[in-house]
Image (spheres, helix red, strand yellow):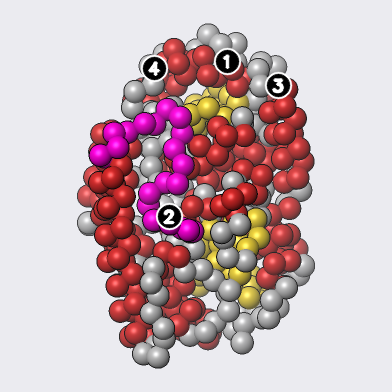
Amino acid sequence: MTLLIISPDYASHLFPLATLGTAWQQAGERVVVASGPATADIVRVFGFERINLQLGRGSNPGTIRAEQQPSGEDDALRGFFAATRRGMVETLLFQAEARSNDLLWNPVEVAREVQRIVTEVQPDHVIVDHLAFSARLALQSAGIRHADVVLGHPSALPVGDEVYGYPPEWPVAFRPHPAALEALHLACDNVSAAFTAQWNGALRSLDPAATPTRDAFTESGDVLLLNYPAELHDPARTALLPPHAFLGSAVREEAADGEVDRWLAAGDLPVVYVSFGSFLSVRGDVLARVVEALCGLGVRVAIATGATDPAELGPIPGSWLVRAFLPQVTLLRHATLAVTHGGNNSVTEAMTAGVPLLVLPFSTDQFAGAAALEAVGFGLSFDPNVVTAGELRAAAEALLALDGAARLSLDRLRASLADGEGPRRAREALLAVPAVG
């Protein structure tokens, strides 16, 4: 049996998708990954076969830097980073306006290449990133059965009267002016209409007899897999989803890191892990405020600085671990608290480790994810552009002392996600439907 995984050329997307593939690998089956060259080493480490597929202009092997992107994509990244400094609505507006280039890049050409790869690989099952719209267009137009994996918050698939790009929930700390929200909603509506027209045009080129969609953002695969814990999702919203399976998490195994292992063994104070992921690590100003907040709390801190020069962070205690990149899964297993931008990998990996989160969301589904954590008592959220070091310190103290019902619920969630449960759930969901025709 052969599994084909289709992923954008971004480490943050490929890590969970490849982790799902380990359930097939452990069953002695063939796994082939179609992705770009930047993530080739990740495929190699997992021990999978690889076939080249470029789904977009940009790429990211671990930490993204504008100067390492192709012309056009570099300016787009700089524009995004600048928007995060202006605020939540400005960032979401910027992302909405860039959506066609980001999500439906050369759709007909990419779709035909995906169809060629399927013919070459002859998979029994196909897993594709939900945000790889050109690839999903290829599979849908050719009638190739596939599992569509939502790697972010489930709101990446709009339901009911939701519109893509407009978060259905907001953390308590974010209360923009109603007029600004109205403008954002209108912009997202307009982008959805334009995106859907682009999708339908490409669909006609690939299959003239295909039925056009009313909203391309609501399209999903034959099997919908959500890399997210059902326990964090509003049951009323769950009822509106198409047939689906919540995977909980897809937490990879990491190679041993001697420096990190020695650091973990060298002290007994609570560990706080800090990371803003592969994109938002560029916000050194916010990381510096986090450093100021955590100093003097009686904790040891591990900080993944990413694109930020550690010199920008101010004085750092000698007992802290500071590196551009750190093994997140390993450190979360030893952490008492994590400070994060609220990316879905960070959220699901922290929940799997039973670690509460101090969330500073900047963009996309990070707002809905932060709101969900607040609702169940597993985290606190703040606007990264205005929060003070004092507010961060008080929030960190509260989360370090998390107890009572919230602590018990978080421990139950951790237990339910343990031992590679996500990949097993994904494999079971795919085996329950007919293989690729």
Per the image, the residue denoted by label 3 is: 403
Magenta-colored span: 158-180
Task: Tell me which residue sits at (65%, 55%) in the image.
Answer: 246
Which class describes the residues within 10 Å of circle 4: few (<14), some (14-19), or many (20+)? some
Task: Tell me which residue sits at (64%, 28%) in the image.
Answer: 335
At label 1, the amino acid type is Glu
Above or below, comparing residue 204 to residue 180 in the picture: below
Mark 4 to mark 1 CA distance (whole Å): 14 Å
Contact flag, marks 2 and 1 (Cβ < 8 Å): no
Where in the figure is residue 47, as x and y percent of width and height?
Answer: 64, 62
Residue 15 horizontal side relative to residue 176, left or right: right
Per the image, the residue denoted by label 1 is: 397
Per the image, the residue denoted by label 4 is: 388
Q: Is residue 262 magenta?
A: no
Mark 4 to mark 2 CA distance (whole Å): 33 Å
Above or below, comparing residue 306 to residue 420 in the picture: above
Where in the figure is residue 104, as x and y percent of width and height?
Answer: 34, 67
Task: Tell me which residue sits at (49%, 52%) in the image.
Answer: 155
At label 2, the amino acid type is Glu
Instruction: Give the secondary structure at mark 1.
Output: helix
| Quadrant of the drawing holding the N terminus | bottom right
At label 4, the amino acid type is Thr
Q: Main secondary structure of the magenta part?
A: loop
Residue 4 horizontal side relative to residue 413, left or right: left
Which class describes the residues within 10 Å of circle 2: few (<14), some (14-19), or many (20+)? some
| Quadrant of the drawing holding the C terminus | bottom right
Mark 2 to mark 1 CA distance (whole Å): 36 Å
| Residue 345 visible in rendering | yes
Mark 3 to mark 2 CA distance (whole Å): 35 Å
The residue positioned farthest toward the bottom in the image shown = 209
Circle nearer the N terminus (3, 2): 2
